[in-house]
Amino acid sequence: MELLKENRFLLKFYETIEKFKLLENVKTVGVGYSGGKDSTSLLMGLHTLRETGKIEVREIIAITIEEGEEEYEREREKKVKQFTEVLGIPLLIKSFKERYGFTLKDMYQRIGETKPLCSYCGVLRRRMLDEVSKENNCDVLAVGHNLEDYIETFLMNIVRGEPERNWRTGIKTSKIEGYVPRIKPLVFMKPSEIEIFLEETGNIKYVYEKKCPYRSRSLRYSILNLIKLLERQEKGYMEKTMEKILSIQREQKQHYKLVPCEKCGYLTTKRICKVCEIIEELRG
Ligand SMILES: [Zn+2]
């Protein structure tokens, strides 16, 4: 296939999908689409492979979650609508407000900087993506985690004392009755490779760059800086670390058990899941 020979991003993207059987028996893919670089290139990559017949996916559905920071989201909405229209991909926009009854702004007013707001927001967003993709009969949910994100999250869970969070995840999560498996086709892509792809295809203009106004200079930020430093000191550090992480995850997965949350029934490692914990705290 000419296209794949000419485009390094698409070739690597396709090889990851094939090697890890990410789209095996998949008719409908939900895509977590924030409008940023990663999810824009993910959407573009899937669209291109489908258009050229390299993957047999029938439907791609973009899912955008509105956390509830109006000014930021109004601008973003324009971009995500434009791009999905260009590609001819259906777009679903769903909000925290309608699902949980509160917005990110409400969360900020209630807990401010006393709690890790980014991590609360992330937990709720992930759950919503799961639910929306299930409601829309997606066979998998694709998310735009790149190489840096993957390593960062792994280290973050360890530093925070929650290593078990690393065992339920992976490039593709296991198929469990009633749950939509999550796939990460960009896990071997460095941020620079993603940027080059978007520039070459002219799609950089659809990327919504502005950072969330509540984004804190959190632990995550420090860990990210550490990874960047290590990569500067030793070229290929991220790829090597990724290999090690994948082998640890494969090993640990076998010893790891999920139980249903006592409140909502969603599978979790604890008695009460994180989403129920957060909701209780915010409403209570
Ligand atoms: Zn729960």
Image (cartoon, rainbow, N blue to C red):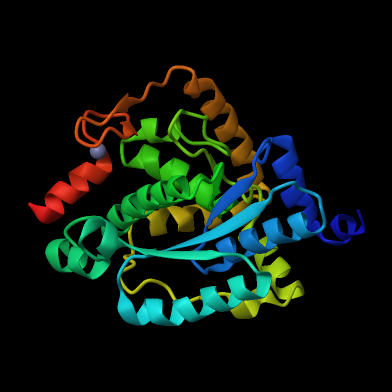
Q: How many marks?
A: 0
129 vs 21, left or right, is left
Q: Which of the two residues, 28 or 2, is positioned nearer the viewer here? A: 28
Residue at 66% of width from left, 48% of height from top?
188
Q: Residue farthest to the left? A: 284
219 vs 206, left or right, is left
Image quadrant where residue 110 sits? bottom left
Residue at 51% of width from left, 62% of height from top?
33
Residue at 24% of width from left, 37% of height from top?
264
Q: Which of the two residues, 229 or 69, is positioned nearer the viewer here? A: 69
Placement of 44 over or under 168, stated as above or below: below
Placement of 166 over or under 206, stated as above or below: above
Ligand 1 quadrant in view: top left
Q: Which of the two residues, 154 or 77, is positioned nearer the viewer here? A: 77
- Please state the horizontal and vertical placement of residue 195, each as a whole percent of the image: 66, 68
Look at the image and tell me whether residue 91 can be seen: yes
Q: Residue farthest to the right? A: 2
Look at the image and tell me whether residue 230 can be seen: no
65 vs 264, left or right, is right
- Please state the horizontal and vertical placement of residue 204, each as a whole percent of the image: 64, 76
Q: Residue farthest to the top? A: 255
Placement of 215 over or under 122, stated as above or below: below
- Please state the horizontal and vertical placement of residue 81, each as a whole percent of the image: 53, 75
Q: Which of the two residues, 283 or 253, is positioned nearer the viewer here? A: 283
